[in-house]
Amino acid sequence: MGRLFWKFFLTFWLALLVAGIGVGTAVWLRHNTWQNSGDELPRATIDVRHAASLLDVAESAYRYGGDAELRLFLGKLHAAHLPPVYAVDDQDRDILQRNLAPEVLQQARALFLQATYPEAIRQVSAENSLRYLLFVPLPEYGFSGQPPPMPAGNSNADFSRPPSQPDDHSSRHPRPHEPPSPLLPILAGIFASLLFSAALAWYFAKPIRSLRNAFAAVAKGNLDTRVGALMGSRRDELSDLGQDFDHMAGQIYNLVHAQQRLLHDVSHELRSPLARIQAAIGLAQQQPVKHPAMLERIERESQRMSDLVGELLVLARLEAGVSISESHELDIGDLLDDIVEDARFEAAQHEVVIRYEGIEETLVKGRSELLHRAIENVLRNALQHCKKGGEVSVVASFDIFKRRLKVTVDDQGPGVAESDLSAIFEPFFRSGDRSKADSIGLGLAIAYRSIAAHGGLIKASNRPQGGLRMDIEIPFAG
């Protein structure tokens, strides 16, 4: 799980927390509004059986405890937000001073006289006490409308004391007040969700838009486009993606410019032999006696162009990762012996001696054509740049435990400038010595990519006593 996961996780729970706070605040405000306006909270509903039980308890409280006990019991019912039980005396006054509509009292007395619903309407009396009509205004008995609220200020009154005579203000109905809409908690949750969703979408959409614009710019050819600076200080997978994009754009920039440079170099290399061929044809036309010499020159230049095209094809296949030959078992010691033996013929032309320290028969698995071409190109490069009468040293060793071949090739040439040591493996690179006309400039580039295809390394360094040293290391599978 990456950093984006934790950002999503924390944002989700923060949104839930804020939404919960908003909903709780809305409910609390609604509750306070009800209390301050004198409205009662919604009361529970009961059926006929529960209504009869409430009247039984109220009747027992009145018979054994009198007015005080009945008043206390009915007050507790009211405080518990249960359906009201009314106790009305002969003067139509409720024991808790609640206001009742005349039609409700009239209907209750009529039903009592008819003895229609004795379980929910009954009359109780005690010695030396008033008579009270106890009833519960259930809708199934024909009662309609909501029960009247308690007088303002009596919600926390002591119901064990006799009520005082209400004044004109307390006897009036409280001012009607419209409670807040029940949609308020829902709207609060929706608003918090929308707020966090918008913030989260902006946070993730901004770098994505930057990446999208960068891709469009690269598609139009603007390879200098970078997005790392647009990611700011964020540290997550999107910033990593931005860094990967910058790396990709840099690689594409280098590849495109390398191809352009290669195309320029190829054009230059082909132009020279073509110009010499044209000059030879012109001389042959003007001086027929020189036909054999000019034909020989044309053949040499044609062969040079053929070699150049062949080397370019090999280089292109190596850079594309196309296998030139299949991997098979070979004797690496015998391969080195053949390369050195072939090079001795060319060394004799350059008046150079090759000193060789080889290895015994060693079987490895690799691509013989690539290995042969790579080591041969390195050795031929040393022969071409070694001074006349000089010596080229080839020392090979094989670590049987690590399965690694090491070849060191030293020459006694002028060496290479330190700034050019890494550039000599680029196509068509030539050092300061421009006198080597037979060199195409692709040998070391092919050697570098052939060795890299085997997972190996090749590096160049100047020897303290003069000349260039090439170190080659190639690992082989066990």
Image (cartoon, rainbow, N blue to C red):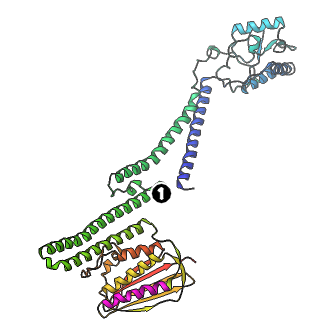
Where is residue 64? Give x, y as percent.
Answer: 87, 21
Residue 463 appears in which quarter of the rendering? bottom left
Is residue 411 visible in this depiction of the protein? no
Q: Say whether residue 6 is left or right of residue 140.
A: left
Tell me if residue 214 is in the magenta stretch.
no
Camera-side residue of 246 and 421: 421
Badge 1 density bin: few <14, some 14–19, many ≥20, Cα 10 Å: few
- Residue 113 or residue 248, whichever sits in front: 248
Q: Which residue is mark 1?
A: 235
- 344 magenta-colored: yes
Q: Secondary structure at mark 1?
A: loop
Residue 416 on image: x %, y %:
31, 82
Q: Which residues are magenta?
A: 334-349
Q: Looking at the image, is 353 positioned above or below residue 245? A: below
Of residues 247 and 91, the one nearer the viewer is 247
Q: Label the magenta part by its dominant secondary structure.
A: helix
Residue at 60% over, 33% down: 28
